[in-house]
Amino acid sequence: MSPVSRRIPTRALLRATGVLAACLALAAAPAAPAAAAAAAVAEDHAQPIEIGAARVTGQLVDSFGLLTLVPAADSDVHLRRGHGRRIQPRWVLTGSVGPANQGLIVHVVGTITQPVEPDPPFGSKIFVDDGSGPIRVFVNTSSGIDVSGLAQGQTLSVTGFSSAFNDPEIDPRFQSDLRQPERN
């Protein structure tokens, strides 16, 4: 979430225009795509939102630490033709994932510090640390990402949505967002 949007009071009505960089379908919760305006957009209408350009009008709410833009109706979400601009992940330290980069696509590389923790039916938790502090990587079940080959002690490259569920976390979007770097 950008510093500007963090100064906007919750329950404010606002419009975000930008690029949807993530579309995270959460079990038992609305989806939470990231908008380039650095506000997350919650949607629970029947049409899935695809990654691309969009304009969303809605109410800003705090959802377990994640500022989320909640449209009142389907008509408040306008998808534009094309794919929008390419989103480049921001490289950050694991210990710096949090409010300063929330709502952005971030990239970290670190060591898996504990066994992968299943969190049914929602997904799995992976804790990664590059020496600056651990970050939770939450792999949503609906993403279809396979974590079965991951284990404590392995190096992991993670790209994903800088999010929060009470505490900061990174939510990978695709299988390619989790990679084990090649060793030289």
Image (tube, rainbow, N blue to C red):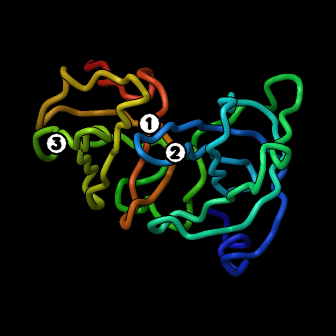
Residue located beneath label 3 in the image: 117
**Which residue sits at x=85%, y=22%?**
82
Residue located beneath label 1 in the image: 172
Give the residue type at disc 1: Pro
Q: Earlier in the sequence, mark 3 or mark 2?
A: 3
Left or right of 127: which side holds 104? right
Question: Which element carries disc 1, helix, strand or loop?
Answer: loop
Question: Which element carries disc 3, helix, strand or loop?
Answer: strand
Give the residue type at disc 3: Glu
Question: Which element carries disc 2, helix, strand or loop?
Answer: strand
Q: Residue 90: image x %, image y %?
A: 57, 46
Q: Earlier in the sequence, mark 1 or mark 2?
A: 2
Residue located beneath label 2 in the image: 161
**Which residue sits at x=23%, y=40%?**
120
Picture quadrant where residue 22 is located: top right
Left or right of 54: which side holds 99? left
Measure how far apart labels 3 and 2 are at the Cα level.
19 Å
Q: Are marks 1 and 2 in contact (CB under 8 Å)?
A: yes
